[in-house]
Image (cartoon, rainbow, N blue to C red):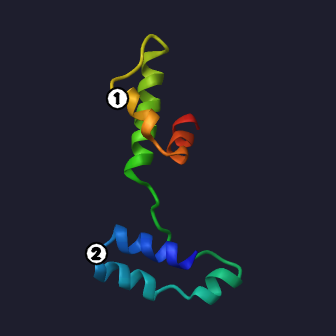
Amino acid sequence: MRITFESHIYDSYSSSKAKDIIKKIDWEIWINKAGLPPFTANFTSIGEQNAVNLANEYIKLGGASSPSGFLSFKTWPNNQKMVFAG
């Protein structure tokens, strides 16, 4: 979990900002004690936003047709398809 979280932070922020965020985390307290983490990461991704946008386009069309770009759905990973369906 820690490695995944830290990788996401380094991928999402500049190196100096990522170091600042990670420096504030006391993993022992965050994982083993009650309370909220010192930082809430934004895990929104382009794939997630694409899934939401395509779902909204389908809703707007009301079943009359498929929106442009609907074929890209076939290439999405399962978690992105779940966001679309959610």
Rendered position, 14 above or below 79 = below
Rendered position, 20 above or below 40 = below
Residue drawn where x is 51% and y is 78% of the image: 3
Residue drawn where x is 34% and y is 29% of the image: 69
Amino acid type, label 1: Gly
Of the numbered discs 1 and 2, the one sitting upstream in the chain is 2
Q: Quadrant of the N terminus?
A: bottom right
Q: Nearer the viewer, mark 1 or mark 2?
A: 1
Q: Quadrant of the C terminus?
A: top right
The location of residue 52, given as percent across then percent down, is: 45, 38
- In the picture, the disc for residue 60 is none
Q: Which residue is mark 2?
A: 14
Q: Secondary structure at mark 2?
A: loop
Amino acid type, label 2: Ser
Q: Secondary structure at mark 1?
A: loop
Q: Residue furthest front?
A: 75
Rendered position, 38 above or below 43 = below
Report whether residue 38 is seen: no
Q: Residue furthest top?
A: 64
Residue 69 left/right relative to 5 = left
- Measured in 3D between alpha carbons, the distance from the residue under mark 1 to the one under mark 2, in whole angstroms, is 32 Å
* Residue 36 position by quadrant: bottom right
Q: Which residue is mark 1?
A: 69
Residue drawn where x is 44% and y is 34% of the image: 73
Q: Given contact means CB atoms under 8 Å apart, are the residues at marks 1 and 2 in contact?
A: no
* Residue 60 position by quadrant: top left
The location of residue 61, given as percent across then percent down, is: 43, 17
* Between 20 and 85, the one nearer to me in the picture: 85
